[in-house]
Amino acid sequence: MRPHTAPRALAWLLCAAAAALMAGCASRPQAPILEQPAGNAAAASAVAGRLDALLPTDLLLLGEQHDAAEHQQIQQQVMAILAARGLLAAVALEMADAGVSTATLQPGASEAQVRRALAWNDKAWPWQAYGPAVMTAVRAGVPVLGANLPRERMQASMADSKLDGQLRGPALKAQQQLIRTGHCNLLPEPQVTPMTRIQIARDISLADTLQQAVLPGKVVVLLAGSGHVDRQLGVPQHLPADLNTKAVRLRAGPGADGDMAQAFDAVWPTPAVPVTDYCAGLKARLGR
């Protein structure tokens, strides 16, 4: 090598080595980013105490009231506490369809990337409400999984009579009655059975996603409406008996806890929320 070319060659080698090092760093998984629970320290401490009473468990089913903002705050606190302890295996969502997940994203992924990965429907499930819990899991390097029955499978579920046998007689009748009251007793009777089948199929889809995510010594968390986590009617009916499962109802406002002892392992009360007359809106849409 001629003397005047040596500095150039050395500089090129240094640049190449630096580029290789940067590429190596870029390909490595990002370190988890542990976020603090939302809300004040006293609230987070109360959630931690309630959580401790349910651990250890394979599955933790958190049943919310969808319009109670404090329930979504509690969900985010649970994610943060379990992640900080290294116990959070995965988060399954009623709010996203089965088949989508954040498993390929890094902890530093943007909210836009997470929403795309989950095919998030903001009209049905406001991201402002559920985003904090989802992002807490993503930041901790924990996969968030869609678990709900995809819309394209609903029509087939409505016609699937085998779903009627997934619940015992009294439980099936109770689920059918909930479908009636959930539709403000406005649903034509011939539609009750098909709509009940969809509800059962959704619970099966949620249960299947949970089972696939189980990791020994860790906890898979389900975020769903309280009806889905009911032990007598919902997801627990479709889970193997050897999985340790705890079902929690987040209840807004007063209620009789004793009446829920068979349906839930715990009831976490929160302040009442303003009552919304959803039936009035449904009647208006149906022209009644």
Image (cartoon, rainbow, N blue to C red):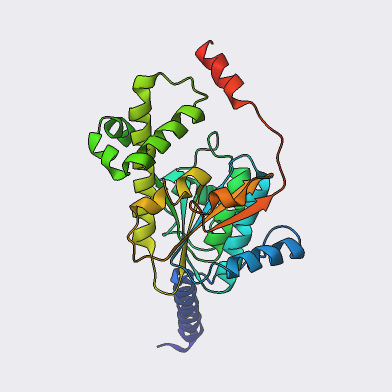
Residue 75 visible to the viewer: yes
Q: Look at 47% across and 68% down and name the residue there.
A: 57
Task: Determine whether 278 is above or below 56 in the image.
Answer: above
- Viewer-proximal residue among 275 and 171: 171
Q: Quadrant of residue 170?
A: top left
- Viewer-proximal residue among 233 and 158: 233
Q: Look at 54% across and 61% down and name the residue there.
A: 137
In percent of width and height, residue 195 lies at 37, 30
Quadrant where the image shows the C terminus: top right
Q: Is residue 140 left or right of residue 276?
A: left
Residue 100 visible to the viewer: no
In percent of width and height, residue 248 lies at 54, 55
In percent of width and height, residue 241 lies at 34, 62
In percent of width and height, residue 285 lies at 53, 16
Task: Determine whether 193 is above or below 229 in the image.
Answer: above
- Viewer-proximal residue among 250 and 209: 250
Q: Look at 65% across and 68% down and name the residue there.
A: 49
Quadrant where the image shows the N terminus: bottom left
